[in-house]
Image (cartoon, grey):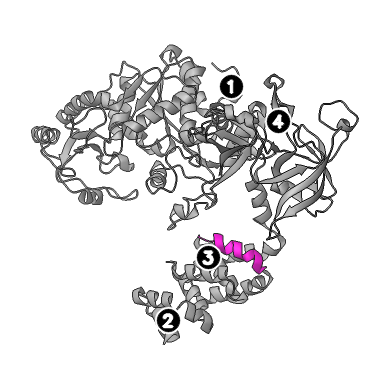
């Protein structure tokens, strides 16, 4: 048990109270109950770490139980992936169990419930049943089948079991209370007909129990003491307890359902249904695409079990829904890899560098430390020659005093090697630099002990030997979505927020030591970020995935674009556009336009193009239109934005876009086709009249 009560999360406090009230710690049992209808994601990792962490804390068994009651969506592939992910995280389950293990017991109990008059077969359509459910503020009405006799219900349920009904033709409902203030208690469904092949029971069953009926009874059969669920199941707790009361022996341990907040993370989606869409529509390369928030995707990207566990620990267990910044997850992996990942040199955008005063045939083997954070990591040998490759961004022909990398007449140190000075360049017919010529201070080799080797220069850059460089495919992965909450916008498909730059595939040059790397090996590419050898990487074709950069480029970008001086006015317009959308009268709108006009005149048009490109939400689109109302539409980006706006459904946006499109002859001609399409489908006489007059 925990010694520091203050450090307990609220779930641990519940357990401690139960132990203090007489529950024997030897009887504690937990479970992790995934449905095998997709791959586990980082949100599930919170539940995994919670349940298995409690098992470790209290030395209690934890079952891995698959909720496999819907054969229409569940597959063995998902079962295998879930087992692999839980094991990879380092957790061991006591028993591998399945809800389908209990199908016969659930059926037998159901017969008893029908005999007790507490369940009935309903032959109505789903639409009819839904209409009778009522609303949270109005009671439901009884089904006409609610008072069918026990004998007839037994016969109808037997007919369901034997395949006598088609899917949707009959359901079994618990008979509870159609007036209950909790809608889950208004005669919920216990069984439905599903004539689908089950991944474990085959075609033995054509009726399948619902989750609510299955879950608590499975907990009871396994002697689970604490059934921990996410907050959306809090309203199901009454039903959980009602079902248990129908079958449980009061002298045996009763499972206790308690709820915690699900893990939500910025810049991603956590719905398995939406993740499945990404896979099925080939918007990602599969469930283990390194851009996916799945555990398998994070593993392929280079995340470690410890980094995910630490993230779960720091983020904590909450009673209320909240969004955790993805930067915290990125911090956890950077912090770990900084201590553990070997440093290597890789050039991602190479330009040739020739040391003119270095002997042409000479080759040296230089010594480089593998990780300055870990003395035990040792050293490695790196070959050095006259011709090298460096990063293109590390050289400028002309640069100011703040540029501390290589420039003509300037000195830098080559990592683990010599101090060099850039002397001249070669260029191609287009004026692009192809070769940088340098001279080296040949007495300045790192670690040689000479006075020259101790000389300080402000810049150090990495390199690879031209003769020994190994070509490698490098996948530069970034966040999959460019919006902080991609699935929070009403009436906007979350896929519209996909980051078009979430993957860039390049050919890089890496040092030869990486030829011995194996899939899953992690490295720091010096000055570039942390990378992981992909599962498909071989010595014949090295493939590395970027796990995360050394610095948070997104934080820099957000800071840069949050409120620059020339965007303060535009930010104010966005806020006013939100009010404009809600305005109910022309007087309100005119008053807002009076505020917007002087702000629009201050907006910098160069910075505006980026805002227009990212505008998807109604408020942002309208802000762009109202700004262009006063600045005019001229650039290709602005014209593309106007064309996009004409396709928006919101009436206020559509009207502003139409008025802007007909404001001058050029725009009217360019958008005439779109206006005619609107006219053909538009139901508003007012909007139709505006368009008809304009294109007449």
Q: Circle 1 sits on which residue?
A: 5
* Residue found 54% across the figure and 76% down from its top: 587
Please tell me whether mark 1 or mark 3 is closer to you in this view: 3
**Disc 2 secondary structure class:** helix
Residue 393 in the image: state x and y as whole percent: 71, 48
**Earlier-in-chain disc, 1 versus 2:** 1
Distance between mark 4 and mark 1 Cα atoms = 57 Å
* Residue 257 in sight: no
Residue at label 2?
Answer: 691
Specify the segment rendered in magenta. 604-616
Frontmost residue, 112 versus 303: 303
601 falls in the magenta region: no
Q: Earlier in the sequence, mark 1 or mark 3?
A: 1
Would you say 401 lies left or right of 275 here?
right
Q: Is residue 252 above or below residue 339?
A: above
Tell whether 189 sits left or right of 82. Answer: left
According to the picture, the residue beneath numbered tag 3 turns out to be 621
């Amino acid at each position: 048990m925990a010694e520091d009560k203050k450090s307990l999360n609220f779930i641990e406090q519940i357990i401690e109270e139960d132990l203090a009230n007489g529950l024997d710690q030897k009887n504690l049992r937990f479970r992790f109950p995934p449905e095998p209808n997709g791959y586990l994601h980082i949100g599930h990792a919170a539940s995994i770490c919670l349940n298995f962490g409690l098992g470790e804390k209290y030395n209690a068994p934890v079952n891995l139980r698959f909720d496999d009651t819907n054969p229409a969506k569940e597959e063995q592939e998902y079962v295998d992936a879930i087992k692999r992910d839980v094991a990879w995280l380092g957790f061991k389950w006591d028993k591998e169990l399945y809800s389908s293990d209990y199908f016969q017991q659930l059926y037998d109990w159901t017969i008893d419930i029908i005999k007790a008059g507490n369940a009935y077969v309903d032959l109505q359509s789903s639409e009819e049943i839904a209409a009778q459910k009522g609303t949270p503020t109005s009671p439901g009405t009884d089904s006409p089948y609610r008072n069918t006799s026990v004998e007839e219900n037994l016969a109808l349920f037997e007919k369901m079991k034997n395949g006598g009904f088609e899917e949707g033709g009959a359901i079994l409902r618990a008979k509870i209370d159609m007036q209950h203030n909790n809608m889950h208690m208004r005669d919920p469904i216990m069984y439905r007909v599903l004539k689908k092949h089950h991944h474990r029971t085959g075609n033995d069953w054509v009726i399948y129990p619902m989750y609510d009926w299955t879950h608590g009874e499975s907990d009871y059969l396994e002697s689970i003491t604490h059934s921990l669920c996410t907050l959306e199941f809090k309203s199901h707790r009454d039903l959980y307890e009602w079902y248990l009361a129908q079958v449980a022996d009061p002298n045996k341990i009763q499972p206790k359902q308690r709820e915690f907040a699900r893990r939500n993370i910025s810049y991603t989606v956590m719905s398995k249904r939406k993740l499945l869409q990404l896979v099925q529509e080939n918007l990602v390369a599969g469930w283990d695409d390194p851009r996916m928030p799945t555990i398998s995707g994070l593993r392929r990207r280079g995340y470690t079990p410890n980094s995910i566990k630490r993230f779960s620990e720091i983020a904590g267990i909450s009673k209320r829904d909240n969004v955790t910044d993805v930067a915290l997850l990125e911090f956890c992996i950077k912090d770990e890899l900084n201590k553990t990942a070997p440093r290597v040199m890789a050039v991602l955008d190479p330009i040739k560098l020739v040391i003119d005063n270095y002997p042409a045939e000479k080759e040296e083997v230089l010594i480089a430390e593998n990780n300055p954070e870990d003395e035990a990591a040792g050293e490695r040998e790196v070959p050095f020659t006259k011709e090298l490759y460096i990063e293109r961004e590390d050289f400028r022909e002309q640069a100011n005093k703040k540029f501390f990398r290589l420039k003509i007449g300037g000195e830098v140190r080559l990592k683990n090697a010599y101090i060099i000075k850039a002397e001249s360049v070669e260029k191609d017919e287009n004026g692009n630099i192809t070769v940088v010529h340098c001279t080296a201070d040949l007495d300045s080799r790192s670690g040689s002990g000479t006075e020259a080797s101790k000389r300080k220069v402000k810049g150090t850059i990495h390199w690879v030997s031209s003769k020994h460089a190994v070509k490698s495919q490098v996948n530069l992965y970034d966040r999959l979505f460019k919006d902080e909450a991609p699935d929070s916008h009403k009436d906007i498909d979350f896929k519209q927020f996909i980051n078009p730059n979430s993957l860039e595939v390049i050919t890089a040059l890496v040092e030869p030591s990486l030829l011995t790397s194996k899939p899953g090996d992690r490295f720091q590419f010096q000055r570039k970020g942390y990378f992981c050898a992909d599962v498909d990487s071989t010595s014949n074709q090295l493939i590395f995935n970027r796990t995360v950069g050394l610095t948070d480029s997104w934080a820099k970008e957000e800071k840069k674009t949050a409120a620059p001086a020339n965007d303060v006015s535009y930010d104010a317009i966005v806020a006013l556009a939100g009010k404009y959308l809600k305005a109910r009268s022309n007087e309100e709108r005119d008053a807002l336009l009076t505020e917007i006009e002087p702000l629009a005149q201050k907006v910098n048009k160069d910075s505006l193009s980026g805002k227009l490109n990212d505008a998807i939400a109604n408020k942002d689109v309208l802000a762009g239109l109202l700004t262009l109302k006063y600045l005019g539409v001229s650039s290709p980006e602005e014209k593309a934005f106007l064309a996009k706006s004409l396709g928006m459904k919101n009436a206020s946006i559509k009207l502003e876009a139409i008025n802007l499109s007909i404001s001058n002859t050029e725009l009217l001609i360019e958008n005439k086709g779109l206006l005619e399409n609107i006219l053909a489908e538009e139901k508003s006489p007012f909007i139709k009249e505006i368009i008809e007059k304009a294109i007449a």
